[in-house]
Image (spheres, rainbow, N blue to C red):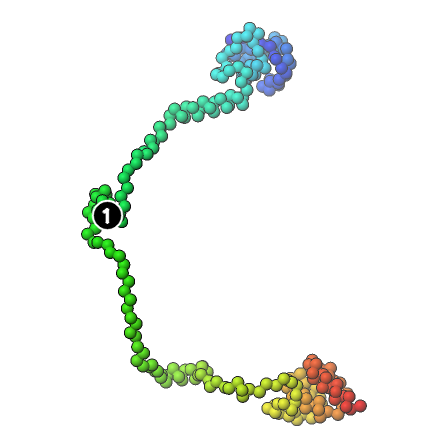
Amino acid sequence: MKKAYVAKKNFWIGEINKELKAGTEVQFDDDKNLLFIDELSFTVKNLLPAIKVEWLVPVDGKYPDLGGGPVGETQAQESDRKRKERFAAMDKDRKPDLIKDERVVGHVDEEKDPMAFASALGIEPNPVKKGKFMPVVVEDDTKVVKVLNIVDKGVDDLKKALNQVAKDKKDPKTFAVFTDHYDAEAVELVGKYTDGSRENTLKEWSNLHWTKKADVIKESTNKEFLNKLRGLESSEKIIERIKSKILTLN
């Protein structure tokens, strides 16, 4: 039905790209969705929400059918109202909760009264009578009769081949401990150095045993040769021996 409305605030109508100023009077036909402004008509399908929130107020004070909800209700309020109505409808369709049975029933202890326990379950009681566990102490009568030592020649040969034969232990008292590792007179197991070529001696110097180095130093009388040996040596004690020998040649 066509009715006269007056705008209570400035708002924009997006469908027709026009703004209504506060105090502007227009006409709106909610059946045909036609808005009349200054004798011009526009099709507006979404103007009822503006009327519902009272941006547009009917001049005669009679509102058209706004589809439920009170006048002045905003969209947020409408959404909240519909949500509550939906939950209320769900509560109506919900099945009643199960009744909690809080009745007190008897208690039967299986250990104390097995007969009553079996009777409560409707079964035959166990005919076996339970008894307490009685530990029995048994004396240990095991005796060692004989230690059997089995000799297998094949196993012994295999151990010998793998060098797994037990060796005789040596008395620690027979061990000789040398505190000076560079005392040529303390070890006689290493042979004397016999190569008289100085060139060969310089080439093999790093591979020589320290006792042979001591022999070379002791027998040498050439300071130039001894200085070359000192340049090849890394052991501090051998270097000290060379320096001492050079001092004796001055």
Residue 125, image x, y percentages: 20, 48
Residue 154 image offset from top left, x and y in percent: 37, 83
Q: Residue at x 60, y 10 (%)?
A: 6
Compared to residue 226, the image places residue 60 above or below, namely above
Q: Quadrant of residue 215?
A: bottom right
In which quadrant is the C terminus drawn?
Answer: bottom right
- Between residue 61 and residue 28, name the one nearer to us: 61
Note whether 33 is above or below 114 in the view shown.
Answer: above
- Left or right, 214 with reference to 163: right
Residue 118 position, x and y percent, is 22, 45
> Is the residue marked by circle 1 packed among few (<14), some (14-19), or many (20+) residues within 10 Å?
some
Report the amino acid beneath label 1: Pro
Please tell me whether mark 1 sits on a helix, a strand or a loop: helix
Q: Tell me the residue at 35%/84% (across/down).
A: 151
Q: Position of residue 157 (x, y in %)?
A: 40, 84
Residue 212 showing in the rendered view: no
Q: Looking at the image, can residue 70 be seen?
A: yes
Q: Is residue 64 above or below residue 209?
A: above
**Residue at image mark 1:** 114
Nearer the observer, 155 or 151: 151
**Snapshot quadrant of residue 134:** bottom left
Identify the residue at image location x=23%, y=42%.
120
Q: How many marks?
A: 1
